[in-house]
Amino acid sequence: MLTLPLAGLTLLALALLLWQWTVALRFPLHRRTHPPPPALPVSVLKPLQGCDPATADCLRSWLEQDYPAPVQFLFGVASPADPACDVVRALLARHPEADAQLVVCPEKLGPNAKVSTLVQLERHARHQARVISDADVWVPPGLLREVVAPLRDPDVGLVHCFYRLTNPSTLAMQWEAFAINADFWSQVLQARSLRPLDFALGAVMATTQAHLDRIGGLASLLHHLADDYQLGHRIAASGARVELCPVVVECHHAPMRWTDVWHHQLRWARTIRACQPIPYFFSLLGNATLWPALWLLATLASPTPSPPLTAQPACAAAAATLVLLLRILAGAHLQTRLTRSARHLPCFWMAPVKDLLQCLLWGLAFAGNQVRWRGQTFRVGTTGRLIKPPDAPR
């Protein structure tokens, strides 16, 4: 009774995989347009918390951008005792020509500590164009030109970039790297092929003060976990376009264990489920490992059919193997295209592992709403709103 529906779901998963692969191939990834002047003066807001061996290089990549207009860099920390302060001071001493300052942002304006820092940095911003970027993001030369230039079009409200995880130093991080470097960016393009983007990716986001004012400013995001999603969603709802910059930036994470990566992925899953419950529910249909495996198991477990159906197990095995091989090939190619590297190819088996773990995350996303973030426990409410549990310390 189950073999026919599972065969149909396998074909659907294959079609979704090929669609995702195709739209990713068509996107001009890594392409640079070399936008001509005039360039917009811009304020770059960088909220910081703690540091690791890559922090200095990530921040230096911003200070060394070649940009033909004034750039103001604002580095924000919640406490003067934060170890990131020493890193920033050392960089500023090496780059006295930079219009940059370290800003202590002690006010806790809401549960989202990152946005709280951004709101306080915003008070010091002098330029209308704004770039917001996470602390662990390294950017290639010329990125600032490419990401700010589209804002000269008044209909463009936000520009954002794809990112890649570049230092998966543990097996758990290799799983997360595959999820980001192979699947996430191509799934974003798949969604964009259906309708204009109405969300943003938070590694690097460029917008203007005028568009921020229309949505109530950054302070309107203080009570949301996915502040990047909310920023893009609200700017799109205001009638402006959200554009993708083809240049890819890099995210450098400190080494993470399985528990760290698991909590990160579960937080991500529950946040997406809260923000986009219907699309997230149907996302399981695209799992190109789950449905072929279930089809094959159902076929092998069914009573021995009479001719001419005796070939069913062999056909299911051949079809499931083909879909799995295509899944592995697509994942390897997409990851290679984003990272411009073949170092991940020995981990080709990560595609089915990621798919099966994703099934568990998908179920847990609907089974609860509690997440761990920045060492604290929250509940994720409607639209990703952060809610502090009643028994949690304040």
Image: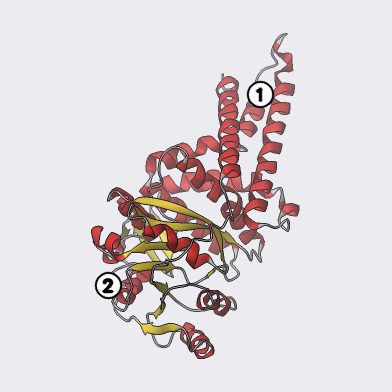
Crowd band around label 1 with a 10 angstrom C-alpha radius: few (<14), some (14–19), many (20+):
many
Q: Secondary structure at mark 2?
A: loop
Which mark is in front, 2 or 1?
A: 2
Residue 357 percent location from the top left of the image: 58, 48
Given residues 29 and 229, the one toward you in this image is 29
Mark 2 highlights which residue? 109
Q: Quadrant of residue 319?
A: top right
Residue 78 percent location from the top left of the image: 37, 80
Residue closest to the far front: 37
- Tell whether 140 sits left or right of 47: right
- Tell whether 292 sits left or right of 161: right
Indicate whether 64 appears above or below 349: below
Residue 151 percent location from the top left of the image: 38, 59
Residue closest to the far top: 307
Crowd band around label 2 with a 10 angstrom C-alpha radius: few (<14), some (14–19), many (20+):
some
Residue 336 percent location from the top left of the image: 67, 52
Q: For residue 299, which numbered disc appears in the image?
A: 1
